[in-house]
Image (cartoon, rainbow, N blue to C red):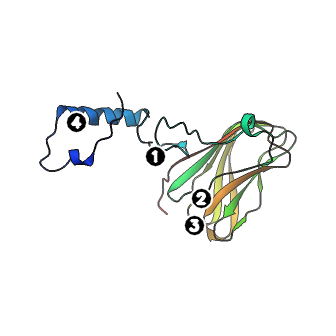
Amino acid sequence: MSWTTLATTLFGTGKPVTASLLQALRDNLDAFATNLSGAPVNTAAWHPYDHVTNGDGNTGVLYDFDVDGAITTVTTPNFVDGWEYQLMFNAIETGAATLTMKVWQETTGSYTAAQTIIPASQNSTGLITLPFVRVLAKTQVAFLNIYAAPSMTVAGYSMTAREKVTKVQLVTSGTFAKGKIKMYRRLAQYSS
């Protein structure tokens, strides 16, 4: 089965319903549900932030040590209204340095104070979920599930005023020495 783009002119009052049209509709449901190449992205599920259609090759990679080398800062692209975001760490290592995260306040135009995400000397894999970054709030939260310290933690970022987060910056006092960071998104599960 594969995805078939169906012209809107095939549908409407008085239009014939053919066996081939019904088969294409059936196959499109399967292609969408199973993420076949060419099908639209299921936006209700987590997917790479830069993913447009299935099979487009976009993987959401923000940082890859094998490509980017030893750097000190990773900044996400700007967040977009209507989405929530997730950062996935895969074997991130910062040596003897800690990894901190701060968020950019959209209206104020400055970063919040940094909070430690990963303590020093840990090779870490896990997730940071940022569910409400595009909602006006005085406090923004990040849910941390980092497997080096296996527990769910909540980090609260005090904003200068009720405002949205534009982007997140991950900073280490040393350098990233290994691993990958990917960013995912899905449609927001709330209304702003």
Kindly indicate whether the residue at mark 3 contacts the one at mark 4 (C-beta within 8 angstroms): no
Q: Which residue is mark 3?
A: 136
Query: Which numbered disc flags the more N-terminal residue, 4 or 1?
Result: 4
Q: Position of residue 159 (x, y in %)?
A: 68, 67
Which structural element holds mark 4?
A: helix
Q: Is residue 127 above or below residue 192?
A: above
Query: Which numbered disc flags the more N-terminal residue, 3 or 1?
Result: 1
Residue 21's disc is: 4
Residue visible at 59% across and 56% down? 79
**Which numbered disc, 3 or 1, marks the residue closer to the eye?**
1
**Which numbered disc, 2 or 4, marks the residue closer to the eye?**
4
Q: Amino acid at mark 4?
A: Leu
Q: Which residue is mark 2?
A: 133
In screen coordinates, is 115 left or right of 48?
Answer: right
Circle 4 packing at 10 Å, graded few (<14), some (14-19), many (20+), is some
Query: Which numbered disc flags the more N-terminal residue, 4 or 3?
Result: 4
Residue visible at 48% across and 34% down? 55
Q: Position of residue 179 (x, y in %)?
A: 73, 35
Distance, label 2 to label 1, CA atoms, is 17 Å
Q: Amino acid at mark 3?
A: Leu
